[in-house]
Structures are given as structure tokens and as C-alpha cells.
Amino acid sequence: MNNRLIHWFKFASPQSFYPLAGKMIPWFWGLAAIFFVAGLYIGFFVAPTDFQQGEGYRIIFVHVPAAWMSMFIYLVMAFWAGLGLALNTRLSSMMAQALAPTGAIMAFLSLWTGAWWGKPMWGAWWVWDARLTSALILFFLYIGFIALQAAIDDARRADKAGAILALVGVVNVPIIYFSVQWWNTLHQGASVSLTRAPTMATTMLWGMLIMALAFWMYSIAVALMRVRAIILEREAHTEWVKELPEVKN
Amino acid sequence: MNAAIAVIRRDLLLAMRRKSEVMTALFFFIIVVSLFPLGIGPEPVLLKKIAPGILWVAALLATMLGLARLFAPDHADGTLEQMALSPTPMGVLIAGKIAAHWITTGLPLVLLAPVLGIQFDLDGAALGILVVALLLGTPLLSLIGAIGAALTLGLRGGGVLLSLLVLPLYVPTLIFGAGAVEMVVSGMSAAGHLSLLAAMLALALFFAPWATTAALRIALE
């Protein structure tokens, strides 16, 4: 039992995680590349033209996965941050810090592509739709998290303060989401509804799912690369970092 | 409980010794509300329609003003450390501080809002709901804001950062607070909105002092 515990926590130490992450990164990049090529091929060449939205709908293959990732990464980030706060494991907090910029980029990308989609479809770059608004607020939450961590010089305090903020945010995300949805239905009739979209052709769905996988792989690869950089930065004083071949040269 | 009351009394006493801080936030509220008609135009119909939103946004911003000073003086003179060391649970003392913050910034806004509402031609029923909604909502603003104040305690550019952290979390309060008044203006019942505000207040009353205390302990380390 004791043995297993030690084994389980082995990679919780930055020293043993650093090389492991280094080994995993190329695999995730490779998978991301494969899925991106496959997903984009399906998206642009295989999937049929939508009879209502024309060719413009194809932005969905980037837009929807980005939106999914932006929401999911916030949960993962809060999970790691909370774990770091509860168990005092340094690597968990580093993981949370590494995920935040990717999540923010995903949120931004979903907003940006949403605007590009909105212009031809709805005739407006932006409407105060419930989903758009909650995505915007999610983006603000990411920015707040990053800004708070950047403002605190002491890494340990930054970790813990960020963790509390992320946890408060996670409690608030559903409240914000539902309040915005209700606000929207009160103020204007559903002039624009994303939920009434015509049933999707199977190839479109496949393309979107494969693109979602590609975004997953990309996010993991980038987060691992960033966590390696954070480890190097924070553990720069240790012997094992000084012994690393890439640091020595 | 006694300890919390002692903290409230102390903070109120301090606020009364320096009335200007309380008054600044109050006049900020009045000025912001008065700026909107100047920016939008004097049409009564339009102004009446957007009055709840204006009053609420101004209340949000006015509450933010006091937040940066919520823990900073106590942090500077070591009172906060004594609170952390005291045998009374720190959460109780912090709850007292938050209550005092609400009494000095939130409560005056609640009392003043109907007067400003008259400027926007809101009728009696709407003004009543405005007061009730603010009565439920402003403590919520103080409670959520305290978490942000504790997180940014002693940081460079803490004030701006504070607003970045706290304002997105204020969104539900704003929606339901302003929504309650709007419902009455358009002739419907505000009960649903007020219940939700009260529910969020109950949640925040329980969790926010606790999260604030955790954040303060991190800042004091």
C-alpha cells in the first residue's frame, strides 16, 4: 500500500515530472498535428455545404472546439489550483498557472471566431446573446487570474491566492452562466438562437469532434511546455536543474 | 459574536473619525448617476427605462471604491496580524469588518438611491423594490468584494487589479438587482429576482468570510 502511494506521487515532484513531460510533449504535438490535418480536411473538403448557412458555417470547426476548451480548461485549472492549495504540492499550482494562458487564448479565439461567424450569419459582429456574454465574462475571469498571479512576486503566495480566486470563480461560473441566460431571455426574445441549429450532418459532427481532439492535444502539449518552463524558472536554484544538459550549455 | 460586534463598533468609530472617506464614496455614487443623463440625453422615457441599470452600476462602482481600504490600514499597523493570532476565530472578526464596510458604504447607498431614482421618474413601487433589491444586493457586493480585497492586499496596483477580479463576479448581482426593478417598471412581479438575490446573499454570507479569511492568511504569511 505504502509502495503504491509513493509510486503514485512520484511524478508530483517537479524533478521527476520535468523529464516525463519532456518525453510526452512530442507525442501530444504529433497527435495534435494528425488530428488537425484530419479534422481540417473533413471540415473543408468532406463536410457538405450547409444549405442555410452556406460555406461560412465551416468556422464552426474552430469555434466550437475552442469554446469547449475554454470552459473545460477553467475547470481543470481550478482543479489543479485547489489540489495545490489542499495538498501543498508545488507542481499542481504550476500546472494551474501553465493552463491559464491557454484557457484565455481559447476563450479569446471562441469570441473572435464567433464574431467572424456572426457577421455573415446574423449581420452583426456582436450580439448580447447569453452564450457570447458568458464567454466574455469567462475571458475576464481568466485575465483576472493571470493578472493576480503576475502581480504577486512571491511564487508561493501567487499560487495560493490564484487558487482561491480560481475556486471562487468555479463556484461563480454556473451562477454567472444561468443569470446571464435568464437576463437574456428577459430582455429580448431569442432573436438569435444557437440551440435551434438544424440537425448536423454526421460528417460535420465528426469533423468537429476530431477538431476538438486536436485542440485537446494542442492544449496539453502547450501546457506541458509551459509547465516545464515554469519548473526551470522556479527551481533554478536547485542542483538537478543546474545538472540538466539544456541548462548547462 | 461579541467579538464581531466589537470589530463593527471599532470600524464604525474609525469611519466616523474620518468622515471624508465615507462621503467620497457617496458623492461618487451621486456624480456617476448624474453623469448618465448628461451623456445620453434628457429624454424621460429612455432615462426611466435605463434608470435601474444606471443606479446599480453606480452602486457597484461606489462599493468598489471603499474595498481597497477595507484591509489595508489594518494590515499596515499590524491589527490584522493580531486578529489572526486572537483566540476568536478570524472568520468571525472578518465578518465583522465586512459588516462594518457594508454599513459605511452599502447602507448609505440604499438610503440615497430612492432620491436619485426620483430624478429618473421611477414611481413608488419601483422605488420600493429598488430599496429592497439594494438592501439584499449591497451586502453581497461587500462580501464578494472582501475576497478580492484580501487577495490583492499589499500588491502593486492593487486597486486596479481589485476591480479586474471583482467586477466579473458582480455580474449576477447586477443582473438580478437591476432586473428586479425592471420587472416592476414593466408591471410584473419581482419576487423571483429578489428570491435569487436573497439566495446568493445566504450563500455568500456563509462562504465569503471564510474565503476572505483564507486569502488574508495567505497575505499575512
Image (cartoon, coloured by chain):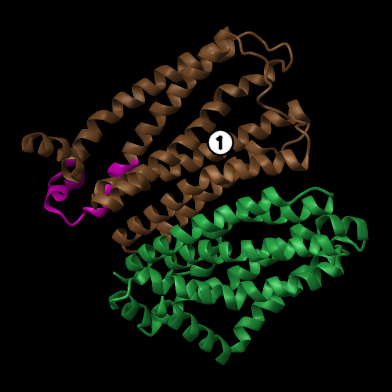
Chain colours: A brown, B green
Is A14 left or right of A193, judged from the image as shown? left
Foreground residue among B77 and B123: B123
Q: Quadrant of residue B40?
A: bottom right
The spot of residue A220 in percent (x, y) is: 36, 32
Magenta stretch encompasses residue A229: yes
**The N terminus of chain A lies in quadrant:** top left
Residue A52 seen anywhere in this rendered image of the structure: yes
Q: Chain of mark 1?
A: A
Identify the residue position indicated by label 1 in the image: A109
Say which residue appears at 29% left-offset and 49% top-offset: A84
Is A110 left or right of A97, judged from the image as shown? right
Is B33 left or right of A207, judged from the image as shown? right
**The C terminus of chain A lies in quadrant:** top left
Magenta stretch encompasses residue B67: no
Q: Is residue A131 above or below residue B94?
A: above
The rendered magenta stretch, by its main secondary structure, is classed as: helix
Say which residue appears at 57% left-offset and 7% top-offset: A46
Foreground residue among A79 and B175: B175
- Point out the residue furthest to the bottom here: B17
For mark 1, give the secondary structure: helix
Packing grade of label 1 (10 A; few <14, some 14-19, many >=20) is some
Residue A127 seen anywhere in this rendered image of the structure: no
Magenta stretch? A226-249
Say which residue appears at 61% left-offset and 37% top-offset: A111
Say which residue appears at 76% left-offset and 29% top-offset: A122
Foreground residue among A181 and A149: A181
Q: Is residue B11 above or below residue A244?
A: below
Q: Is residue B139 above or below residue A64?
A: below
Is A46 left or right of A37, judged from the image as shown? right
The spot of residue B33 in percent (x, y) is: 77, 68
